[in-house]
Amino acid sequence: NLSDRLTASFKQLRGKGRLSEADIDATVSEIRRALLEADVALPVVRSFTAAVRERAKSAEVSAALNPAQQVIKIVNAELIEILGGEARDLRFAKHPPTVIMLAGLQGAGKTTLAGKLGRWLREQGHTPLLVASDLQRPNAVTQLQVVGERAGVPVWAPEPGNGVGDPVAVARSGLQHARDRQYSVVVVDTAGRLGVDAEMMQQAIDIRDATDPDEILFVLDAMIGQDAVTTANAFAEGVGFTGVVLSKLDGDARGGAALSVRGVTGKPVLFASTGEKLEDFERFHADRMASRILDMGDILTLIEQAERTFDAAQAEEMAAKLAGDGDFTLQDFLGQLAQLKKMGSMKKMLGMLPGMGQMREQLENFDEREVDRVEAIVHSMTPAERANPKILNGSRRLRIARGSGTTVAEVNSLMERFDQAKTMMRQMARNGGKGMPGMGMM
Ligand code: GDP
Ligand code: MG
């Protein structure tokens, strides 16, 4: 299965010291093969592997992770991305009732979902009504009634006056009933065929036009493999849909449907169905699905820990340097800047540091590009200069200013601030303050 194949592709990276281009290429083609075998749609496979390759090649060499871990981390991040990241909420109508129409092939899990959704909505404080607009199969209405009873949600079924034998009439009268009785959400169950056919699609379109749904949820059986894409496309072009529900994710789903559907249709997956019982239902979480596919929960945790530990060790090393003989060099400072940038907006960072209250005003005028300028200056120094700024005479300073696109005055001012910061930070470190050693420079 997909997990095993991916694991195997990472194995060949074990024992490598660093990630070479050849390693990346080999791993990416393994990943590509694994995805194709898992019935992931070709365009999705293409963009996925391209993204992984790009990220792997441009990844800064992380001393915290070995090559296999680095690639796993990248693949995990890309999986989450392709699965759609954070799921959005259901869209509710400004003026109730909200109409949610279910569409999908026969056996996809629509009727089961109607019950699950009904129960879930009720728990959220809504008053849902299920509408039986599947009149195709003899016992379809009874099935919805049974499900509704279990969920504690009323069901609107065809009867003389509500429409008999006409799913569109049932949908229309159900919606009217919901308006009359102040139901807040209407879930319309519809018929499906084993394969997509024109008549079924037209019926779905007619129900859609009669009820003007706020959401049309396409229910997709995660087990159907390669057909998932064809089916999803047929529904997208036919009745259209606003969101996807993946059903039967409890089975030995290969992950192909989940990975393809979002990439091919561009529509978000909102919910996941994971069993036959009403409670086997949850909001879709891309990160959970990704780790399901990777099946490497433990390794991902390890990776996070390794990175955290590494950062902590670096910070400690820095603190020790400062508290000791103060051999805090510009090279160290460069490392600090990289860390700072990694942590996001400088302004936000500065705002979070303790004891910065009186600096608020200065913060407002803080120019983040200053970090880039400082970085450029330090980059233009030789290792010897970084380790020992005392050797920076006039001609060296001029060379550095030219190399970094700054002025000698700017270089001078940075060096002055560096000296001050060193002194200040040394004191801070002695007093047990943690602070960011480089902060005083800005
Ligand atoms: P519909 O034809 O689209 O309305 O599909 P149904 O709701 O009738 O479901 C078809 C079959 O799949 C039924 O036997 C359900 O119990 C089963 N089913 C639905 N959702 C799930 C699920 O998430 N996991 C499992 N294992 N079975 C499911
Ligand atoms: Mg059904």
Image (spheres, grey):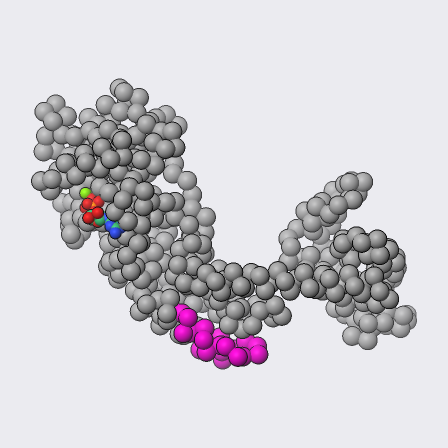
At 24% from the left edge and 52% from the top edge, which residue is drawn? 234
Position of residue 212 relative to residue 352, above or below, is: above
At 13% from the left edge and 30% from the top edge, which residue is drawn? 158
Horizontal side, residue 314 vs residue 153: left or right? right
Horizontal side, residue 330 vs residue 202: left or right? right
Q: Quadrant of residue 7?
A: bottom left
> Of all residues shown, which one is farthest toward the top?
180
Q: Nearer the viewer, residue 228 or 4?
A: 4
Residue 165: image location, x then y, percent: 9, 33
Q: Nearer the viewer, residue 263 or 17?
A: 17
Q: Is residue 230 one of those drawn in magenta?
A: no
Residue 438: image location, x then y, percent: 77, 58
Residue 154: image location, x then y, percent: 24, 28
- Which contiguous range is marked in magenta? 6-26
Residue 28: image location, x then y, percent: 43, 72
At 45% from the left edge and 54% from the top edge, which residue is drawn? 287
